[in-house]
Amino acid sequence: MADDYKGYRGKAKDTLIEHKVRVWSDVVIDSTRGEFIGIILPRSETADDKHIVVKLRTGYNVGLAVDTIKRIKEMSYKEAIYKIPEKEFPYDPKKPNVKLLGTGGTIASRLDYRTGAVIPAFSPGELYGSVPELADICNLNTEKLYGVFSENMGPDQWRGTAEAIGKEIKKGIDGIVIGHGTDTMHHTAAILSFMVQNSPVPIVMVGSQRSSDRPSSDAALNLMHATKTAAESDIAEVMVCMFGPTSDEYGLLHRGTRVRKMHSSYRSTFRTIGDIPLALVDNDKITPLKTDYNHRRKDKKVTINTAFEEKVSIVYYYPNMKPDIIESLIDHDYKGIIIAGTGLGHVNKPLYEPIKRACKKGIAVYMTVQTLWGYVQMYVYDTGRDLMDMGIVPAANMLPEVAYVKLGWVLGQTKNLEKVKKMMLTPIAGEITTREPYDGYLIYQGGLPEITEFLKKHNR
Amino acid sequence: MVKKFGELTDKEYEKLGFKCGLEIHQQLFTKEKLFCHCPAGRYTNEYDAEILRHMRPTLSELGVYDGTALMEFKTKKNILYRLNHETACTYEFDDTPPFPLNDEALDIALEIAILLKCNLVSELHIARKQYLDGSIPTGFQRTTIVGIEGTIPYKNRKIQIRQLGLEEDACREISDKGHLRIYKTDRLGMPLIETVTYPDMKNPREAAEVAQIIRRLTRVTGKVRTGIGATRQDVNVSITGGTRIEIKGVSRIPLIPELVHNEAMRQKALLEIKAELKKRKLSEKSYKIKTLNISNLLKNTTYDPIQKVIKKDLLVNALLLPKFKNILSYPTQPEQTFENEISDRVRVIACLNTLPNIISSETKNKNLSQKEWKTISAKLSAQSTDAIIIVWGDKQDSETAIKEIEIRIKEAMEGIPSETRQALANNTTGFERILPGPNRMYPDTDLPPISVSPQRIKKIMSGIPEFPWDREKRYRQMNLPQDTIIPLITSKYSTLFDKIVKNLKIDPVLTAATIIQKFKHLKREGININNIPQPEIYKMFEAYKNRKFAKELIPVLLEKMPSTTFEKAFKSLKIKSVNIKQLQSEIKDSYAKHKKTLYKPKKKENIKLRTERFLMGKLMHKLVGAIDGKIINTELKKLLPVLIKQK
């Protein structure tokens, strides 16, 4: 069986074969560095072929170089199966029904010997086994749509998820939770905000920044917050529900079109950009922070529109960018380009020519800002006016990633540039706002006396 | 009955089946922490921010929950971490994945693994060892095995080493009250090695002696930290029929013997209790405990702890333990009975940590009135052979406490529960948590394995220090002062000592006395000897060897050297060195100058001695520091008879 040597190749695999042992053999290994007793473990495929991994009696793993091994003697065979204990999720007719759609991520996960990393594990029973508190909130049903890391989410998965949501709403579900890897959660949140319109129930995206296989994981609390939001919240929109502060205190509900992952590893990585979050959620209650949201309805009506044109790109401008970047998009038949420009929305002169060509060819070119916060304003400087003359359309305060998925969605429906422009600039799900509140841009800076005092007083 | 420490002979320990193993934790002397770039060894009580976390148990690699983890989860603690800007970064509070393992730390760990004669691992796999008490914000300690199966010589036998691990140190606890535990994060993440022995020690004294040997072995490298908390011992104890109990965090080696003795006696007592319960035909499978809410019965009690609780509207519960008479009052440790075992569990697991947290029908201290006990007894329909425990707290904590008491009572019928216990001030121990097993290990998926190349080992081997026992033998042969030998073996100056003695051929006794006694003396006077770079100390000895100054000046120079170089310190003394010829003419001059005023004794034989003493004083005053007093004396003794004769 191939699994007998799981992950081993080359010299390491030959050594196992030569000594007539396999993965999960309980062995005594005699080596030039002494004797080692333990169980042979599978090896990560990305690791080298020079070592054999053994779990010692103390629970520790060690790697033994194959060229130090003299003899291996098998004593017995003990296969281990890593499995989260499954318990049947209880049903209570008085509780709201929530559907958890899984796309992947580490919200529920287990160890993958193939890569040595963690892979998603997912079933109501497994979730109940690890987060029994969920049963106090709702009746939970799950469906695994995909099992991918979030960077592998794309148009196919977006469409599939939107359709699955539509089906659940039509069946009368009280709320939907979507388990998702965090890296591209904001892309998916944005596209779902466009593909699923007029939802009568909350659609809550959730993930974890620390995989659920560690005791300090944010997974359990995020999951509790998200299911509570799906079950009880009055906000019938696509939202991201993740940690507010890094402390285990409360979650924030971010509008799907205004949210962005802002730190590669912090728990409180998701922030609402250019506005304040929709609401706060903890184990006791949901506290709205905004009032202008879509309210929960009793009907089962929803519009699902999964159009998507894939030939759209984001160009992140940098000084000295060469024209060939834009030219190659034109030559490869791209239909839409989102530029993340500097400051109020600028690029350098050498790009003028190719941009002109792109617009002339009928490619939809939109300007956003790489400052993330603030509006595009192309009248202030000549550069902006020149660019608009060529046909670039300023996209107000749409975030670059949001503009990207929206343009794909719009171009999937029409290629008429006038119609595209009208649709792009008419906000559908809060992706463009007419006002930026004074507290929509708050990044407190460490070191300042007032912030130091704040941090000492509050667990953030 | 419980025998006191010192009352048992080695033979008696042997008869008990006493076995003891050690886990010695030693901080390594590195610039940075093990998995991030924060400075190591900077301690502070100041903090800039606090973070709140909770811990949840997760599965081990082999798909099992660890008992300790489940126990800690029951305590439902809020855990606060205090962060200081200088000593912790986002890694410490688990918001940034680990940086690559500190190479400096790994080299030191390998060096010590070699000294312990361990089989070296060729590829390190970082594991996560679960700690749900919150002492590490991730909920696990990153740890890795560097070597296994080593040995150290002890008496005429060998003590076996199970393994040497390299791991990150945990937080320091500030407080633990009710459901809130507070930690500071300065020590968190510092590199630490853990040396684990087999249970090869056969009596309490041996445990301390072996701990001492291991401590010295790590210190000969000169690359480990010393001082308060830099070395911590966990001690495992068992007796025949008993079980392995781990006593955690013994700060000083001399405490070990009495602690392990008391633990052995506790196990013996628990086995006696088990036998007694068996005699009474009680079994954990069928034993039933009746619980009754007695808040109303005690409404008007004058017993202070319960009165307070009643005022706060909390619950008071009574538990009826059938056929349990005289068990709760059975002595287990000095000043402690089985009732303490139960109180401990209630304290730790139900977080009822204001003592007393329980009382019983066998509690000696004054508590409820006779009448109150009678009423309770009647309500529970208690028989004369039964015992009653009373516990109080809020609803949730009371429930946890009642469950926990039941668990501990039933464990008494099985024998000795596997526990980690903390060392207490009076050399007894208290329950800390259920002893964790191998099920709390999980591979660290954040870091790839690290290969330890033969070249790396070869390089470390080339600089390996001498074994402490070899060093000791050598120093004894040099006739060093008794009190300098042991400190010098583990001193960071021991290499410098050898260099001075070997290269400069300076008297080893003088060198050892300077490095150990003088340094200690000066440190006590507040001189920061640690600030003097070793090469400067060497320069000083070199100058002394070249007769630039007298040995009397060594402390004077050392006093100045923490803030300057040897060269500058020496110049500032404005010493003119004196050679033998110059000394001889000084002696002649001095004699000539003073001869007329010299005392004229009546008895001739006294003249020489008196004159010698007088002149010695004068010469020392003039030449102090320029040449050794001993040399002055020798020359004076040689010259004086000649001068006297000359008249």
Image: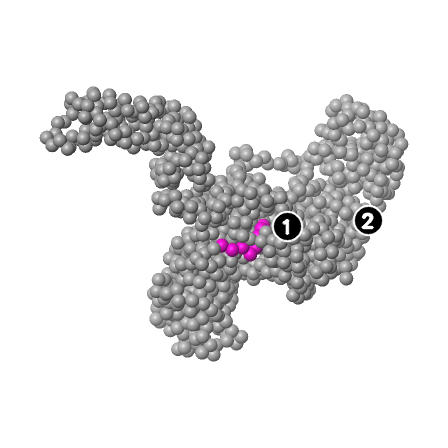
Q: What range of the chain is rendered magenta? A: B141-152
Residue under the point 42% across and 48% down: B473
Q: Which x, y percent locates residue B242?
A: 48, 68
Q: Is residue B320 above or below residue A148?
A: below
B171 to the left or right of B569:
right
The CA distance from mark 2 to mark 1 is: 42 Å
- In the drawing, what numbered circle is on residue A156? 2
- The chain containing the residue under callout 2 comes to A
B384 to the left or right of A98:
left
Cβ–Cβ under 8 Å for marks 2 and 1: no
Q: Which x, y percent locates residue B371?
A: 35, 71
Q: Main secondary structure of the magenta part?
A: strand
Residue under the point 56% across and 45% down: B461
For mark 1, what is the residue? B123
Scheme of image coloration: one colour
Q: Nearer the viewer, residue A393 or A263?
A: A263
Question: What amino acid is found at the position of numbered circle 2 in the picture?
Answer: Asp
Which of the 4 quarters of the picture holds residue A228?
bottom right
Q: Secondary structure at mark 1?
A: strand
